[in-house]
Amino acid sequence: MSAIVLRLWAALWLVLAWCLPASSQVAPGSNAERALEAYRAGSYELAHELWRLELDERASATIGPVAAQRNLGNAAFRLRRPLEAAARYTAALRLAPRDETLWHNLEFVRREAGLEPADRGDLTATARRFASSWTLPECERALLALLLSLALVLGWEALRGGALPRACALVLLALLALAAVPWTWQLRHAQRDTLFVVQPEGAPLLSEPRTEAALVARLSPASEVERTDALPGWWRVRTAEGATGWIADTGAIALRAPWR
Amino acid sequence: MNAILRGALGALFALCALLALSPGAAAQGASGGASLRAYLTSGVVRLGDRVALVVTVENARSSELGTLPSVKGLGIGPVQPPAEQRSIVFLGARRQESVTRTWTIPLRPQQTGQYAIPGFDMLVDGVARRTNELSLNVVRDLKGEELGYLEVRTSTPKVVVGQPFTIEVLFGFDLAITGTTDYANLSLAWWASLPGLLENATPPPDPARARVQVVVNDREMVEVEQLPNRSYRGREFLQLRLVRSFTPTREGRIELPTSHFEFGRTVQSQDFFRTRREKGETYFVRAAEVALDVIGLPEQGRPLEFSGAIGQIVARADATPRDVDAGDSIKFKVEWTGAGNLEFFTAPDPARLDTFRDFRVYGKSEERSLDRRVVTYDLSPISSAVTEIPALPLSVFDPVSGRYGSVSTEPLSVRVRALEGASGMSVDDRERFRSDILDVEAGPGAPAPDEPLGADLIAGLAALVAAAWLALRIAVRRNGDPAAPAARARRRARKELAASLLRADVARAQLELVHRFVAARTNRRAEAWVGVRVGGAGAELDNIVAELEREVWGGSGTPLPRQRILAAADVAIGGGL
């Protein structure tokens, strides 16, 4: 009897340990901690560099990518680079699309940079925000749960028939269709290797990866383009209008598609 | 609302001014932006003097001289090929090249008199255009130089593109002949033909001075100002003044040909039909040619914030009210006066100046005129720490020194009180709270999201679910529809037996319920099972039926335990009943 109680007690502790949030402090002496200290001391350039290291070296990182992108955005804004800050917040929102702090900061820096709001509040923007409000794994989990429920209901319908299982199946199918909207959107958009143009005067789109090449177009600041190839110092991109060309890698920031 | 309306009107005015300064407007062309002008090198000449008709076409790709008119007593021609001149037109930051073709056609008057040269056709960019009519006065002798005077002068010998200047015509005649002088005519060949200039509004006349009507070019009546009499060559002269103001829009040289002032008395003549007044004794005074150089704004030293202001400008500022609460509106009125293009420069925007970072700028209203420019800014201090409205600078090019400089207002002291009844936060704090990013994430934050399962897996699972459902449904329905009434009654039989047995308190009722149960499970009528054994897995059920029948037919009617009947039913169902 006492052995059973002990096992139950141990299991309860395991469950509690799994449920409790991870430590709320970063590891002492890590880049993240030094970056935080530098930021608090007003050394924004150093803080920016350290957080960038945290972001680039994921294997040894002590903070999550959302926090790293958010903090990089703050440091960039303090360094009077609002376009880069907007890029960082946009990248972070791809990982945590419902984070109110990120939305606040993004809209603020876009306003400071003289850009249109990311969420204009009209019908199209609201639909886009709904579609992008879940990450791809979240969409998949929701779809899996709904598929499992649907399988049970369909089994019930196959064995017993009747109006009730059919109604339940229809409701579940409607929910599946609704959940498929953000999933499809994420499949279509979030997995692209997107770049965010951060050059205040716009990035020149050149026909070849050399500075003397012909100018194909000028990418407006804060526009998003898809990266299709890369060379040292250069990125080949495709615009939303279908134009392709090369830009210098200093003119844009990769939004770091997390699942590529 | 009024301020908004004034602001809109100001913007409209600025737009109109910009459009007026555009090359198309400057060229004054009726079609395609090309302009055509014709004038005489002198409106009055002595018989035998040289005089020419000058025709200029500006900003045209092609132009041809049409057939010249024929005027009795006046030889016109021969026509030489045109001279071509290229010049640069400056419009703010824009630079445009202008091409001018000039035909100089000699005129040979054969006798004295007044010649009217009618307009003639020109082909400009393929379109026929007509010149204006001109008047030439040919006299035997230009006498009377000592009886009058004429001076044509510009306010400056050299101007910068965009810098306003005036052309002043001073003229008059000896007061001693006032009684015998009853007409005056200014012969100004350049009057309607000054290319590259935009005429400004005339300054309002001095109400203390008399105004006199004078004829210009024997055609047009203009009002001139009468100045105090003037002593000249030891005699007293009547003095009149005509002023026109212009703004040059391009570089180059502006030449004002010889001008004449003609005055005298008229005589009355009568013929059979009517009485006419004709020029009698006429005197002429001549003014030499005048030239003005228009130069471009120098690039060297031009500040990035250059407003386009040119001239010698003075700034003055005032603000009301001076004692306000934080967030209240202050009308900051700035007035620029002096000799300059006050109508055309771009007023500075305090919102773009660091010195005004403690103020919100809600808008401005403007009043423009030739002699002053007034801009009223709507400012609001955001902090009680504000003690003054800083100096507002205006970047100006001074054509006298030839350098760019800045004209600033004086700082104005103000008192700003913190808002009463506000929370513990000062106005500064609230502003900062509202308008800043939220702080960095001090903790490790959310972990990296899981890897996605992939669209193939999701789609495969969906297909599998659909296929499994179809397969199961087909297999189940081979044995009949599970939703049919008989099938549903069969599934319900056990549940109904259990519920009904609770109410059955005699053996007869229990027997009926057992028969009904067996009937529902076998899809037959209950009466069909009277006296019939189920057999097989229903053997226990058969025993119970037999016992119940004995109780019923034996007369005691004692019921059997409910649990026993249900257990027998379960065994029968498990055995395939």
Image: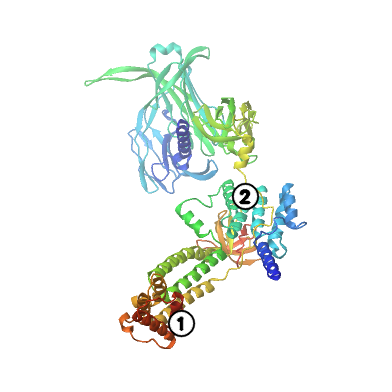
Instruction: Say what secondary structure mark 1 lies in.
Output: helix
Q: Position of residue B553 (x, y in %)?
A: 34, 81
Q: Given this view, does label 1 or label 2 mark the residue nearer the observer?
A: 1
Vertical relation: B132 (above or below) B451: above
Residue B37 relative to residue B71: left or right: right
Number of dots carrying numbers: 2
Residue A207 relative to residue B36: left or right: right
Can you identify the residue that label 2 sits on?
A82
Q: Position of residue A245 (x, y in %)?
A: 57, 63
Residue lying farthest right?
A29
Can you identify the residue that label 1 sits on?
B571
Residue A2 relative to residue B79: left or right: right
Q: Residue at x 41, y 28 (%)?
A: B47
Q: Position of residue B181 (x, y in %)?
A: 39, 15
Front residue of B320/B463: it is B463
Q: Can residue B499 be seen?
A: yes
Q: What is the CA distance from the residue labelled 1 to the residue labelled 2?
A: 79 Å
Amino acid type of the residue tagged 2 in the rendering: Pro
Residue lying farthest left?
B272
